[in-house]
Image (cartoon, rainbow, N blue to C red):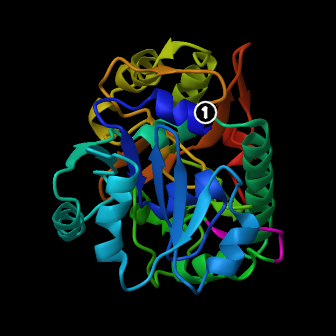
Amino acid sequence: MLKNIRARFKNYNALFISNPVNVNYLTGFTGSRGLILITRKKACFFTDFRYLEYAKKIIPKEFEVIQIDKKWKTDWPSILKKYKINSLGIEEDYLTYSQFLGLRKISKGVKLIKSEQIIEKLRQFKSVKELQYLKKSQEINEKLLKKTLGFIKPGVTEKDIEWFILQNIRAVGADGTSFIPIVAFGNNSSIPHHQNSDRKLKKGDIILIDMGVKYKGYCSDMSRTFFTKKPTDLQSKVYQTVLDAQKAAIKSLKNGVLISKITGAAMKIIEKAGYKENFQHGLGHGTGLDIHELPNLGSEKPEKLLQNMITTIEPGIYLPKNFGVRIEDMVIITGAGYTNITKAPKELKDALIEL
């Protein structure tokens, strides 16, 4: 791993990592005070006395564990000097402006340079173990959705279902939630990231649920849309259009495919049905230790999906003040094509639930 990171150094001779998720990815450390410095020949992990004993047990042997305390600001310049650092890559997407100013103040004579998501780009490529964790996370997520559907009845509120999901996360084997679940009834479903309310469910309401759990720290993500009575012709048309768009996008997945080709496959179907203006968010995103990671299927850059990346595919159509439909699966890019690790039923016939 360190060799791969150093090979990606650009115009700097050391990398400073302060994003806790990246620290966790490289070392397994999950405490609130952990920093990493990687030079051409050395890797250091810094933490304070609260975590020192724990860190020495779990930090990989490639890293020297160093205690930091109140003298950090005065010790840092000597560390830079010791390792002959004159240019330092920083995580520009994570550091606040005040943190950047503070780091610059104690790094006199050292150029602070954007690292351009060096760790995040490595995190796109999942190891065998990471893929196992992600598959298990999604398996648990689907188990929780099935349990949740048994709880749904007329009179429950969006917040009731949110709370049921959160209460049952541990019971189904997850460590936590990837994000606060989105639960939208009726015309609330036309808001892609609706904020759960006290609205009560009535027979005939559409239900949109977007949910995810964590297993071993790895996030799952899935959206399903349900009907509580036979859908209207318009609802059926919109649902089938979203499903067909998702299937077309998934079918186009393979090692080396341009992201633009995948989004194009979905948009072709949505546009043909007349709903181009009703799908405005990205088609999908990577997942891992963060719920939103690279790759970004909303990117307009000429980027490709490659083997061992994982992405969601989540087209949606949203008719303002009427209803919305989103269907989301998690898919792994393989050497032979793809593997869809989301098994929850999604055909139109499966979307009708009895209350």
Q: Position of residue 98 (x, y in %)?
A: 18, 70
Question: Vertical placement of 45 versus 163: above or below?
Answer: above
Kindly identify which residue carries mark 1: 125
The magenta stretch is 171-177
Give the total of numbered labels: 1
- Nearer to me, 68 or 114: 68
Q: Is residue 188 left or right of residue 12?
A: right
Q: Where is residue 162 shown, x and y percent of the image? A: 59, 76
Residue depicted at x 17% and y 58%: 108
Closer to the camera in the image, 278 or 93? 93
Residue 63 higher or lower than 165, as above or below: above
Residue at the spot 29% in from the left edge and 75% down from the top edge: 74
Residue at left offset 56%, top offset 85%:
49
Please report the residue visible at 67 percent of the width from the left and 60 percent of the height from the top: 28
Q: Is residue 70 magenta?
A: no
Quadrant in which residue 150 is drawn: bottom right
Specify the quadrant that holds the C terminus: bottom right
- Which residue is more in the foreground, 326 or 251? 251
Q: Is residue 225 among what the camera can see?
A: no
